[in-house]
Image (tube, helix red, strand yellow):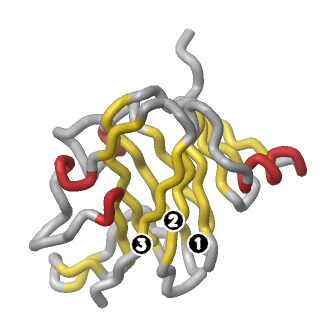
Amino acid sequence: MKPARCIQAVSGLALCGAASMLVAATPATQAAATAAPAEGEIVITITNMRSTKGVIRACMTTNEDIFPRCRKDPQSHRTVVPAGQNVQLRFVGVKPGKYAVALLHDENDNGKADRALGMMPKEGFGFSRDAKVRMGPPKFKDAVFDYSGAGENLTIRMRYLL
């Protein structure tokens, strides 16, 4: 049996495993959500949110071929948490490797990245290493970071074009 991949959010919810079991946080889990990352954990702090509407959709993958569309990777770490002024995600059970993170501020919570004229993103987005966006999402090589397995903190700035 494979260990479940889990995330925790400061909002006090944890998402674990392929079955997407949602567990309400206890006070101990709340404290853990703000503690320094332990071995096998990556904590992502999201900055520059323009509103508290909707949700943040986050995915972290090692699969270069499908990035940034992590939904197609069954091994990816994914979560959806309420948007807020101070959002922090905690991925737990992370194995060492090369990862890239993609974020979407889904302000209307419709499960997709809304676009103007079919091209320009209407909602916020962000990528690990603050990878640049040029005529489309960044390549995996621009967002990838090496994860040793030790606890790690990342900061990702949310960007808005409209």
Q: How far apart, in angstroms, are the residues tagged by discs 3 and 2? A: 13 Å
- What residue does disc 2 label? 56
Q: Image quarter for residue 41?
A: top right
Residue lying at 32% horizontally and 59% vertically, measured from the top left: 129
- What residue does disc 1 label? 83
Count residues near mark 3 (Cα–Cα under 10 Å), then give few for <14, some for 14-19, many for 20+: some
Q: How far apart, in angstroms, are the residues tagged by discs 1 and 3? A: 14 Å
x and y, in percent, of residue 66 in the image: 21, 42
Q: Amino acid at mark 3?
A: Arg
Whether pointer 3 and pointer 2 mark residues with C-beta atoms closer than 8 Å, the reply is no
Q: Amino acid at mark 2?
A: Ile
Q: Image quarter for residue 99?
A: top left
Q: Can see residue 148?
A: yes
Secondary structure category for the residue under label 1 = loop
Residue lying at 46% horizontally and 40% vertically, measured from the top left: 77
x and y, in percent, of residue 14 in the image: 68, 45
Secondary structure category for the residue under label 3 = strand
Mark 3 or mark 2, whichever is nearer to me: 3
Q: Which circle's residue, 3 or 2, is located before the other in the chain?
A: 2
Q: Can see residue 20?
A: no
Which quadrant of the rendered structure holds the C terminus? bottom left
Q: Which circle's residue, 2 or 1, is located before the other in the chain?
A: 2
Q: Image quarter for residue 119?
A: bottom left
Please indicate whether residue 8 sits to the left or right of residue 162 in the image: right
